[in-house]
Image (spheres, grey):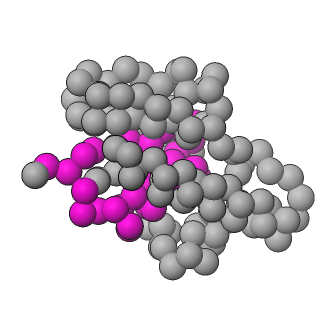
Amino acid sequence: MAKTKILFVCIHNSARSQMAEAFVNTYYSDKFTAESAGLEPGTLNPLVVKSMAETGIDISKNSTKDVFDFVKEGKFFNYVITVCDEASGQRCPIFPGAMKRINWSFEDPSALTGTDEEKLTKIASIRDSIKATVDEILKTL
């Protein structure tokens, strides 16, 4: 049986979508395969890399990808899930054949202020929320 393909999209593909992709591919690879991309690919957030390492998942070698390259390549996804705010999620391109498009709204780690330790605490909260949402939703897909 073919695995269900999920694409996670956010603005820069530097944090939220990378975390969601990693959780799916680490814990649910028996049924799902995930990729992630951004509307305006940026640089992987080093604090997010550190936060994910705290869970035992290494994303340090990941690169950011452009969602529009996936469209040009004609990639197929069963689900396209935006993990940015609703307005930004509306900028996501339409993927032909995608069964469903879903929006999960999570705070942007790149917009956090404070010391690195304060940011890491907030990123851990965002990370844990993403993991909980992945766990909950994938049970129903």
Q: Is residue 137 left or right of residue 44?
A: left
In reply to whether residue 30 is colored magenta, the answer given is yes
Q: Position of residue 124 (x, y in %)?
A: 69, 65
Residue at the far right in the pictured view: 114
Q: Is the residue 120 above or below the residue 104 in the image?
A: below
Q: Position of residue 9 (x, y in %)?
A: 48, 38
Q: Is the residue 81 above or below the residue 47 in the image?
A: above
Q: Is there any visible trace of residue 9 in the rendered image?
A: yes
Q: Is residue 89 left or right of residue 75?
A: right
Please tell me which residue is depicted at 20% across the width and 51% down the height of the picture.
Answer: 3
Q: Is there any visible trace of residue 46 in the rendered image?
A: no
Q: Is the residue 46 above or below the residue 89 in the image?
A: below
Q: Quadrant of the C terminus?
A: top left
Q: Quadrant of residue 62?
A: bottom left
The residues colored magenta run 2-31
Please tell me which residue is depicted at 61% across the width and 77% down the height of the picture.
Answer: 54
Q: Nearer the viewer, residue 15 or 25?
A: 25
Q: Is residue 93 left or right of residue 39?
A: left
Q: Position of residue 114 (x, y in %)?
A: 89, 58
Please tell me which residue is depicted at 82% across the width and 70% down the height of the picture.
Answer: 117
Q: Quadrant of residue 104?
A: top right
In reply to whether residue 58 is colored magenta, the answer given is no
Please tell me which residue is depicted at 29% across the width and 62% down the height of the picture.
Answer: 29
Q: Quadrant of residue 87?
A: top right
Q: Position of residue 52 (x, y in %)?
A: 57, 69
